[in-house]
């Protein structure tokens, strides 16, 4: 095993049939894409891999995309695909590490104890010459005992409280620089352009190279280059709460664990004309 965050394709291939290892494809489309990743998973996946749909295992009572599900929704979903809190869950996506960190974060705050991400995702697995399969995958159901870490999730009200009371918390936005600086429109229609007041910009793609995270030294340097104070609490955001988790994982890797994710992110903040912003 590589470390507490990742496994290599070689490691996973060697442990593919371990009883305690459960593989999860957590692919999700970007807002500009209309890709059916569930169908692509049916067509081709790592042997024994389950599909975890971040857009369906979500709070469907809001019009915001893939918001964190209620505890019972998460519990039922993972029970059904045969995962309990003690399994070693290996997560991958079919893209460039876009959605795997969001699944990592979701499992982590609901109490999963052993979570890893497959370096390079499905592409890295295939490039290493390992086999894939197609069709449905079934596992016997399990009972996942949830321990929800609510302080790792930030709401709009909490953001406003930070702004109104000058709480020493930093906001870091994972969107592309042009969107952060209001030079490019948001991919979701109807949203204002700009960013949270006082936010710093660390585009999620800056931390990733060919489907893998950069080294901890490089990641720490990237945050510092963007004037991020790594001694302060941090709240991350992005367009919809997906790639904000890329930053959470990167910060965790460099030892900064005092973090929370603003789940509504710009999909929520940018839609409300009454909320302050900067450009």
Image (cartoon, helix red, strand yellow):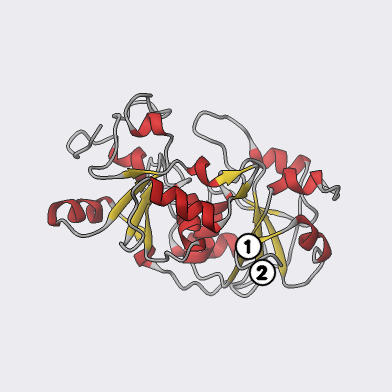
Residue farthest toward the left in the current orientation of the protein: 165
Question: Up-down: is 73 above or below 20?
Answer: above
Residue 250 appears at what percent x and percent y?
50, 55
Residue occupying image coordinates x 65% and y 42%: 210
Please state which of residues 215 and 267 is positioned toward the viewer in this rendering.
Answer: 215
Q: Quadrant of the N terminus?
A: bottom right
State the image coordinates of residue 95 (x, y, percent, origin top left): 64, 40
Foreground residue, 169 or 262? 169
Spatial separation of the CA atoms under disc 2 and disc 1: 7 Å
Total marks in image:
2
List x then y, in percent, for residue 276: 19, 39
Q: Residue at x 66, y 69 (%)?
A: 88
To which residue does mark 2 refer?
88
Q: Give the label, 2 or 1, closer to the camera.
A: 1
| Residue at 77% across, 49% down | 125
Residue 206 position, x and y percent, is: 51, 42
Q: Is residue 135 visible?
A: no
Q: Earlier in the sequence, mark 2 or mark 1?
A: 2
Q: Name the residue that disc number 1 marks.
A: 116
How many residues crowd around disc 1 within 10 Å: few (fewer than 14), some, or many (20 or more)? many
Placement of 113 over or under 169, stated as above or below: below
Please state if 86 lies on the left or on the right of 102 as rendered: right
Using the image as rendered, state which of residue 234 and residue 66 is in the foreground. Answer: 234
Q: Are marks 2 and 1 in contact (CB under 8 Å)?
A: yes
User: Of helix, strand and loop, which one carries label 1?
Assistant: strand
The quarter of the image holding the C terminus is top left
């Amino acid at each position: 095993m590589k470390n507490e965050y990742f496994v290599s394709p070689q490691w996973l291939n060697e442990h593919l049939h371990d009883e305690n290892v459960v593989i999860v494809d957590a692919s999700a489309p970007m807002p500009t894409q209309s890709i059916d990743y569930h169908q692509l998973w049916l067509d081709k996946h790592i042997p024994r891999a389950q599909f975890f749909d971040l857009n369906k295992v979500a709070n469907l009572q809001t019009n915001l995309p893939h918001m964190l599900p209620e505890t019972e929704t998460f519990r039922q979903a993972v029970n059904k695909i045969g995962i309990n809190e003690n399994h070693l869950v290996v997560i991958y996506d079919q893209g460039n590490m876009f959605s795997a960190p969001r699944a990592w974060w979701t499992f982590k705050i609901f109490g999963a104890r052993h979570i890893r991400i497959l370096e390079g995702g499905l592409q890295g697995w295939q490039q290493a010459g390992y086999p894939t399969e197609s069709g449905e995958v079934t596992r016997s159901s399990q009972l996942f005992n949830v321990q929800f870490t609510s302080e790792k999730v930030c709401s709009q009200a909490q953001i406003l409280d930070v702004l109104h009371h000058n709480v020493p918390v930093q906001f870091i936005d994972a969107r592309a620089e042009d969107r952060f600086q209001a030079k490019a429109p948001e991919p979701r229609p109807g949203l204002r352009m700009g960013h949270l007041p006082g936010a710093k910009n660390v585009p999620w793609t800056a931390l990733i190279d060919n489907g893998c995270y950069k080294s901890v030294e490089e990641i720490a340097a990237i945050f510092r280059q963007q004037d991020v104070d790594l001694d302060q609490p941090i709240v991350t955001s992005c367009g919809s709460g997906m790639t904000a988790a890329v930053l959470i994982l990167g910060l965790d890797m460099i030892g900064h664990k005092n973090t929370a994710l603003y789940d509504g992110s710009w999909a929520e903040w940018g839609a409300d004309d009454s909320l302050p912003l900067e450009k």
